[in-house]
């Protein structure tokens, strides 16, 4: 894995499958996180399916959802298929309440 961002307890890594985020994503880091992930996505070939893994995001955060939506827009704009989105339990609940789970290929983690 390649570390793209390590800032204020938030880590973004890129690997063979896609992007992995951990830490408490808030609005102070969200723009930087979105930019780093978007830059990585822009460099991927359109035929490579990508996984977005946010299971390491500790807290419920609309900032994290904003980043996820930005990456989804970037992927679609460049023809990249998002194979799956993995969310922490807290983010999965927020995504469901916001009605976004129907728009994303969210994988339900077994309890």
Image: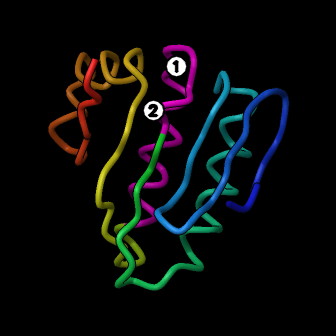
> What is the number of the mark on residue 61?
1
Q: Which percent across, then down, holds residue 109?
A: 29, 29
Give the quadrant of the N terminus: bottom right
Q: Is residue 61 left or right of residue 51?
A: right
- In the image, is residue 6 above or below residue 37? above
Number of residues whose C-alpha sits closer than 10 Å to that of mark 2, classed few (under 14), some (14–19) or many (20 or more): many
- Residue at horizontal 59%, vertical 63%? 15
Q: Is residue 17 magenta?
A: no
Q: Are marks 1 and 2 in contact (CB under 8 Å)?
A: yes
Q: Is residue 66 above or below residue 44?
A: above
Which secondary structure is most common in the magenta stretch?
helix
State how far apart marks 1 and 2 are (Cα): 7 Å
**Which quadrant holds the C terminus?**
top left
50 horizontally vs 36: left or right: left
x, y percentage for residue 105?
Answer: 23, 48
Residue lying farthest to the front in this orientation: 111
Q: Position of residue 24 (x, y in %)?
A: 66, 21
Q: Residue 102 location in percent, x, y?
A: 15, 38
68 in the magenta segment: yes
Q: Is residue 2 left or right of residue 90?
A: right
Nearer the observer, 28 or 59: 59
Specify start and end residues of the magenta stretch as a single range: 54-75
- Disc 2 target residue: 65
Q: Residue at x 39, y 72 (%)?
A: 77
Look at 55% across and 14% down and name the residue there: 59
Front in this rendered view, residue 55 or 62: 55
Q: Neighbour class for label 1 at 10 Å: few (<14), some, many (≥20)?
A: some
- Residue 74 as seen in the image, left or right of residue 108: right
């Amino acid at each position: 894995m390649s570390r793209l961002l390590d800032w204020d307890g938030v880590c973004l890594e890129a690997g063979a499958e896609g992007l992995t985020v951990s830490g408490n994503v808030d609005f102070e880091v969200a723009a930087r996180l979105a930019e780093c992930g978007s830059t990585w996505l822009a460099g991927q070939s359109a035929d490579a399916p990508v996984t977005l893994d946010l299971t390491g995001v500790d807290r419920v955060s609309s900032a994290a959802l904003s980043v996820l939506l930005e990456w989804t827009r970037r992927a679609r704009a460049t023809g990249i298929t998002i194979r799956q989105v993995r969310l922490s339990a807290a983010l999965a609940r927020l995504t469901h309440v916001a009605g976004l789970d129907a728009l994303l290929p969210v994988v339900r983690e077994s309890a």
